[in-house]
Amino acid sequence: MLSKFRQHRLLFAWNWKVLFSSFSYFRTQQSSNDYISTLCKQNRFEEALRAFDFIQTNTHFQVTPSSFAHLILACSSLKSLEHGRRIHNHLLRSISASNVILNNHIINMYGKCGSLLHAREVFDTMSERNLVSWTSMIAGYAQNNCEVEAVVLYKDMLRLGLVPDHFALGNIVKACANTKSKELGQQVHGHVIKSVNGFHQIVQNALISMYTKFDCLDSAMAVFERIVMKDLVSWGSIIAGCAQLGYELAALSHFKEMVRLDSYCLNEYIFGSVFSACSSLLQLEYGRQLHGLSLKFGLGRNHISCCSVCDMYAKCGCLNSARKAFYQADGADVVSWNAMIAGYAYSGNIEEAMFFFSNMRQLGMKPDQITLVCVLCACSGCASLHLGRQIHSYIFKMGFDLDAQVCNTVLAMYAKCLDLSDGIKVFEEMSAIRDAVSWNAMITACMQYDELDEVFRLLRTMQVSESRPDQITLGNVLSSCASLATLDLGNQVHGYCVKIGLEFDITVANSLMDMYAKCGELDGARRLFQLMADPDVISWSCLVVGYAQFGCAFEALELFRKMQGLGIKPNHVTFVGVLSACSRVGLVEEALHYYKMLEIEHGIVPTKEHCSCMVDVLARAGQLEEAERFITQMPHEPDIVVWKTLLSACRLHRNVEIGKRAAESIMKLDPMNSAAFILLSNIYASNGSWDEVGKIRKVMRDRGLRKDSGKSWIRIKGRVHDFSAEDHSHIQSDVILKTLEDLFWEMKEAGYAPNLPFSVKCL
């Protein structure tokens, strides 16, 4: 009984004998070499390598240098270092070892296979080198992220007096692009211009790609415009550059021009760029037209094109079309699956996102980091917590628990699902892989839960960690100070910003201004604004809104006029401040003027905040009918805030009819809203309609509604003191009440008389 190993050996030998007897290709040395060359020319590289093995094992024929060149090319194409080493070793034992052409092929092969040590060893031991030798070695370095070595070798080549051809120039430009050194790239560009081969298309296309990587679209466009005979790569490079750098309209314009010329066969990569541009612009209709055009070019089933189509439809919210494109693709890859999962996840359809995630795994596709990040993003809210925990377990099982990006998303998921304790556990387990994003996510989560002490504890710990606080960290902490009006802590953070040199970073400076403005420290906000070298629209808006909120309406409007005079285009937040300022001082006509200016002059679609401000302007001025008419004609569905604004004004101006309609509108939106009943009750009380007051009281009792107690707080020496209406539980309540009584009489002596009788009697 033969062993299985021996059976396999006999079967293997028998197959080779069958192969040998079946083909006439191996009968002579010439026919054997011709056969290898033919297979390589037909891109049947694996068969060529098997034929080489057969010749070495079963014949005494010699492989010619030309056949070796083809075999090395086969190894390069397959990126098979194992076969490449074997063929190289065979060459070293043959008379062809000193052949310059073959050595150049070997250097190129090792570079393609990522074995630069072997490539450099061959290069250094060559007794004779030509321009191709140097170019192949430079290309190997450029392809394997060894840009510095490529530049050094290029300089050595120039010192020897060799004139670089277009291949050498193209490769050194690619190497410069990967260094991210704009200065070095410009120096090489200058050398390219002086070179006799510098205007070759390969070099010019490489320059376009380099400048787009440097975020220098103007320079890339200048190179593109100078190319006389543009090829497909030229157009593809400039279209991709525009799309990647945020110039989507320019990308689509170049694509349109390219199609108009009707001289190029569009490929999936160019369509990928323009689909990406449509995604960013949310131009669904244009995307549909491009999809139809891609079908005409026969790319309907191309998996790269289909992936781009899926992503475009998903980001534009057309998930049914994305799904159809996905199922039409031949062999969807991980990127295609990720596009579908991301589309459903970001649209809030967690069931479909999980359906694709499950199918992906059932088909044997291994999810990557992006897959898991997309699935976790779908889990937001308490209802998704159980599912989020399951995905977290899967992450541990698949070994992604050491990936910082995935763990940061897990942390954010627990925060969104209102499970801060598990989020803290994840953060603690990430001690070895924490980065700035991890710290910022944890600080943001604590801010959401108003855990101010924990926020500052994390900030102090982060200061001594490897990930020092950055602009985002400080912005988040300052936002927390602003929302809780903790000026003393905000001052401490400001001091730390000064210490680490980030005080005048535009992001940090704007956050500091916002904190000072919301804490009522307008002088501090103004001083910081005046120290800024180049305040942006956010800086101006912070100050305008701050002045408006604290009653400095004329200062806010003056600042807005100065902003306009300097040619700074206001944003929607700026106009919220301007309209609020007009409301404070009763400037109705000015408010109407600014509201019209919003869309006509600045192209800003009015938001709910703008509409609420306008209702407040009209209602405060006593123009209640106009305010009600404005609400009915708003571009948005009126919400509770808008109706409450009108209802409060009706109480002030004692307008029962409009107040009643406003209260009814609030009750339709929220039948359990106690504030609407209280305000309407106060309106009736101010007019002496006590029967109506009694009816409202009865409705509130029947529904179990009570007035929400007013609450305030103050932080003194690290301790927060809470106060509620009619609450005498504080240890110093007697002293507080006595102080309030003294303040009341001082206010009365100063001429302030609060309008209390009707509300006291009612409530």
Image (tube, rainbow, N blue to C red):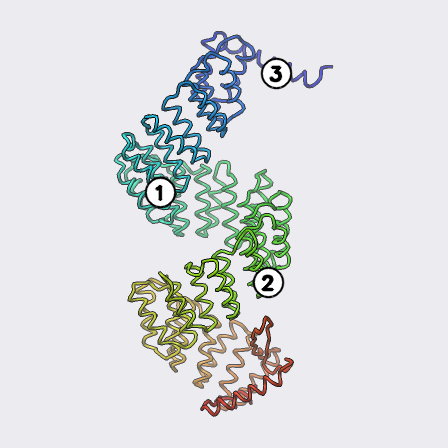
Q: Is residue 217 left or right of residue 38?
A: left
Question: In this rendering, which labeled residue sits more in front, label 2 or label 1?
Answer: 1
Q: Is the C-beta separation of discs 2 and 3 under 8 Å?
A: no
Instruction: Look at the numbered disc 1 and give the secondary structure of its residue.
Output: helix
Name the spot of residue 60 as percent of width and height, x first. Answer: 52, 8
Amino acid at pointer 3:
Phe
Residue under pointer 3: 12
Mark found first going from the N terminus, 2 or 1: 1
Q: Secondary structure at mark 3?
A: helix
Residue at the disc numbered 1: 183
Observer-side mark, 2 or 3, equals 2
Judge whether 51 appears above or below 366 on screen: above
The residue that label 2 is drawn on is 454
Q: Quadrant of the C terminus?
A: bottom right
Label 3: few (<14), some (14–19) or many (≥20) C-alpha neighbours in 10 Å: few
x and y, in percent, of residue 163 in the image: 31, 27
**Residue 262: in sight, yes or no?**
yes
Q: Residues within 10 Å of mark 1 (few under 14, many from 20)?
A: few
Pick the front one: 450 or 5: 450
Question: Considering depth in this image, is 81 or 742 the residue closer to the camera?
Answer: 742
Task: Give the amino acid at mark 2.
Answer: Glu
Q: CA distance from mark 2 to mark 1?
A: 45 Å
